[in-house]
Amino acid sequence: MPNDAGAPISDALVLDLSDDDFQIAWFAMTQEQRQAVGESGFERYRKLRPLRKRESIVERAQAKLDAVLLRHRGNDWPAPLDLEALAETEPEPPAFIMPGWLPIGYATGLWGHGGVGKSGIALYLAACIALELSFFGKRVERRRVMYLSCEDREGVLHWRLSRICKHLGISIADLSGWLEIVDLVGHDVVLWEKDPHTGGTYTAAFGRLQERVEKHATELLIVDGISDTYGGNESARTEVKRYVNALVSLIPADRGAVLLLGHIAKSTALAAQSTEGYSGSTAWHNAVRARWYLYPETIQDEDGSCGERSGDLILDLQKSNLGRTDQSMRFAWDATARLFVGREIVGETGLDRAHRDRIEHRDVMRAFKGCAERGVNVPAATSGQRTAYHVLSAAPEFPDTLKRTGKPGRKRFWRIVEKLRQSGALIPDSYKDSNRKWRDSLVLAPEGMRQCVE
């Protein structure tokens, strides 16, 4: 019945209902609400209870709720596209609230391991969009934002938001009217759940959300997170898609968006940098039009195994149906701001990658030169316990970008070595090891030495 859980209810209002409606209302009420009605309500329910099975009450309650929601939202398919009219107009490119990352009219997923920092980053983004402030260098469009917090209570939200606002140079009051944060910890927040008796899926929580969205004129809905609000089967593609579509239907198609926060599968969390940053089956990957993956950066060992964490977080855009996916952001902990501060990762554009390659090429040559000056032999071996990479990466001149990026960095290193060999800047040599055995090595040719000086 249309009443908030725990709110006082007039005994006359309930007792005046018909027998059928009284049973439905009584079943939906909390214990506190029943006590407010009084003993007369309990007595009437005891007399009527044998006449109706509990299941039939649930069926009728769910059917009535579904009927109301369907009437309100409409159940008709839209008319087909007018191709003649489209032929006379110029098409517009896909629109974004945050270019490339947050498409308008669709759902986007932000996935990551529990406790990695998704909520803090999502709340920071919500504040930026609410006031049209740059999100760590990325332009955003202003929207009215609703943030559903199913994991953090008011105290944590206040503490987190105060640090965000201080870092942005604003006050929490500036967000009033543009950012609505709802603390739902401890409340019934299942927005989609398939009833085994009726097959209905709309819940009372979804009805409350719909009312809030309309009242606030919400344009960006952030749900933190799906494990609290989705009551279906994570591996059932149709159920996942219906849940996502139900949320997308709440926001304006030409200005709004939905951002869903979810946990990744355990196997993905253990794999560190993974290309499958989503939960459950591919249902979640397919249900959203863009997918972000937040994970702790791990510096891999030379054998490809996971090494130590750097302390930074990496946010990858792993899926984008409406734009390019070669975008990432790095978040480093700021001890003064007491939050993770982000920046775009160099190498996002072709120009950036070309600049990075030039710097790495130069510093690899300087590492060769430094080893020669220090009397350190650089083996020519490409595999084993002591390769050219092992020796040069310990040199102070060696570029940090080749060490921090794991396997991709090692691949770039060996490409640089091959280019140096083919250009004649790097030539083969030999030396005797500690066991007086001859080993192949690599040294800079005179031309290579000259390039290092330039």
Image (cartoon, helix red, strand yellow):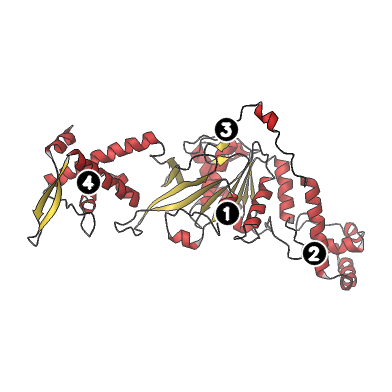
In the displayed structure, 242 sits above or below 128; it is below
* Horizontal and vertical percent position of residue 207: 74, 51
What label sits on residue 284 in the rendered view? 1
Q: Earlier in the sequence, mark 2 or mark 3?
A: 2
Could you tell which of marks 2 and 4 lies nearer the N-terminus?
2
Residue at the spot of label 4: 396
**Could you say which quadrant of the image residue 303 lies in?**
bottom left
The image shows residue 291, relative to residue 79, as above or below, that is below
Q: In which quarter of the view is residue 52 placed?
A: bottom right
The residues bearing labels 2 and 4 have C-alpha atoms spaced at a distance of 71 Å
Residue linked to disc 2? 58
Where is residue 399 shown, x and y percent of the image? 27, 44
Give the mark nearest the N terminus, 4 or 1: 1
Q: Is residue 402 visible?
A: yes
Mark 3 burial class by Cα count in 10 Å: few <14, some 14-19, many 20+: few
Residue 419 vs 54, above or below: the answer is above
Residue at position x 56%, y 34% in the image: 132
Q: What is the distance, in whole Å, between disc 3 and disc 1 at their CAs?
A: 25 Å
Residue matched to label 3: 93
Pick the front one: 79 or 395: 79
Please tell me how crowded label 4 is: few (under 14), some (14-19), or many (20+) other residues with Cα within 10 Å: few
The kind of residue tagged 3 is: Pro
Q: Could you tell me which secondary element the residue under label 4 belongs to? A: loop
| Sequence-first tag of 3 and 1 | 3
